[in-house]
Image: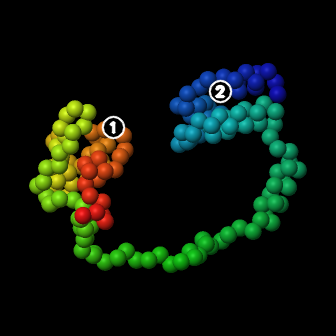
Amino acid sequence: MSPTIGQQLAQLQRLSTPQLRLRYAEVFGEHTPANNRTWLLKRIAWRLQVLAEGGLSERARQRAAELANDADLRLNPPVPRQPARPAPAAMPTEQPPIDKRLPPAGTILARRYKGATVQVQVLQRGFAYQGQVFKSLSAVAKAITGSHCNGFGFFRLARQGDQ
């Protein structure tokens, strides 16, 4: 490799992706939609070396063409192993059952945490805490404590088997 090629390759490393796209257009004579910096670097480096030192020999090109002709090419797309199932007809969306450990909607759950009383209102679907609606008690407990914990445990609600 001549020093000028080495210097050009070193300069490529300092270019941004948009600059590499411009350099690609200069070297190849066409624009590219590619934004992958690594790919652009490799392609431009390859092209600079080909222009400076020559590409593949005619014998190598012929051998590559022979190998390509002998390759088994797929003419049809592969058959899927299992036929795709049609989308189910518009089924009524059922609400998941309400957990039996929860008190009825409208109930206020209160707990002392770090010297303050925390109050959460049970909604029909979710929980209200400080003006926000959360999907689960665990999400409320995480908002209060800053770390994940079991919402039922945090609010000391009975477990499924407890009475």
Vertical placement of 28 versus 128: above or below? above
Side (left or right) of 93 relative to 64: left
| Pointer 1 residue | 146
Q: Is residue 22 visible?
A: no
User: Picture coordinates of residue 85 (x, y %)?
Assistant: 44, 77
* Residue that appears at 55% across and 42% down: 34
| Pointer 2 residue | 12
Q: Residue type at mark 2?
A: Leu
Q: How dense is the environment of label 2, judged by Cα within 10 Å: few (below 14), some, or many (20 and up)?
A: some
User: Picture coordinates of residue 53 (x, y %)?
Assistant: 82, 33
* Residue that appears at 28% across and 75% down: 90
Extreme residue in the front direction: 163
Vertical placement of 123 versus 141: above or below? below
Position of the C terminus, as image quadrant, is bottom left
Task: Give the foreground label among 2 and 1.
Answer: 1
Q: On the image, which quarter does residue 147 sit in?
A: top left
Q: Is residue 148 visible?
A: yes
Vertical placement of 1 versus 94: above or below? above
Position of the N terminus, as image quadrant, is top right
Extreme residue in the right direction: 59
Side (left or right) of 68 relative to 145: right
